Image: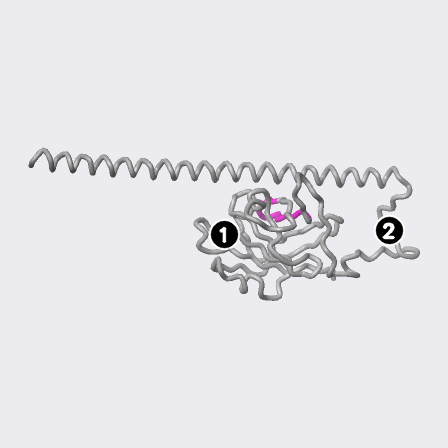
Amino acid sequence: MSSKKKNGRNQTGLLSITIGLLLIAAALFLTARNLYDELRAEQSARQVISHLEDLTAGTAQEASTNPSVDPEPTVGEGQIAVPDYVLCPDMEMPVETINGIDYIGVLQIPALELELPIISQWSYPNLKTAPCRYSGSAYLNDLIICAHNYASHFGNLKNLREGDLATFTDMDGNVFTYRLVEQEILLPAAVEEMESGDWDLTLFTCTVGGQSRVTVRFEIVTDN
């Protein structure tokens, strides 16, 4: 074998090794970046939840010390006031602004040990902070919430089972309880399918690589 051919093969081998090392480095960088984003999102969610708990505690304390604040407003004697959203379900959901971001409430999923603030409007930057309202309203029984597949967000939706419960608490303290009735896998472009159907609450997240969407559907639990 001539030295020219041998050198050519050596160069090709070195090039292949270099490309392989670069690909490994890129994969490690992306993994590290994803882990950093997930950790930051988890910490951000905890800070928002803590802020909302402090706000709720402050409101309760004010109600207990200020006689002008009635913790249980009534209409007439012995009648509890009807919430505004019942009288006007088309009303905008109230928001609480924290660090420049509007939140509409808190989602709890006991089976996954999740308690997450929900951002009013979805965007890709917002999704790196917390789950977001994709569309709809809790007052109209058509709320759709999306989130990244971080383990601390919606990464474990696939582990939910029929009958599992979720609650959504809005910024006025109204609590909505839901029961899981169906789980499905949708394509990323299946927007119409995502928004169709008579579902009171829908949660969804993309699978790893974004090839499909894990989607869980809930119906509201009403008092007997």
Q: Residue at x 48, y 40 (%)?
A: 34
Q: Which residue is drawn at 85% across and 49% down?
A: 72
Q: Which of 161 and 95 is in front in this view?
A: 95
Q: What residue type is labelled 2?
A: Pro
Residue found at the far left of this picture? 1
As drawn, 46 above or below 105: above
Q: For mark 2, what is the residue?
A: 73
- Please give the range of residues in magenta: 105-114
Q: Is residue 53 found inside the magenta-colored segment of the image? A: no
Label 1 Cα crowd, 10 Å radius (few <14 / some 14-19 / many 20+): many
Q: Element type at marker 2?
A: loop
* Quadrant (top left, top right, bottom left, bottom right) of the N terminus: top left
Q: Which amino acid does label 1 sit on?
A: Cys
Q: Which mark is residue 206?
A: 1
Q: Is residue 133 left or right of residue 214?
A: right
For marks 1 and 2 on the same chain, the one whose residue lies earlier in the sequence:
2
Q: Could you tell me how far apart the alpha carbons at marks 1 and 2 are, in whole angstroms?
A: 43 Å
As drawn, 135 above or below 4: below
Q: Where is residue 58 in the image (x, y as percent from the top left)?
A: 78, 37
Q: In this view, does 7 lie to the left or right of 42?
A: left
Q: Is residue 107 found inside the magenta-colored segment of the image? A: yes
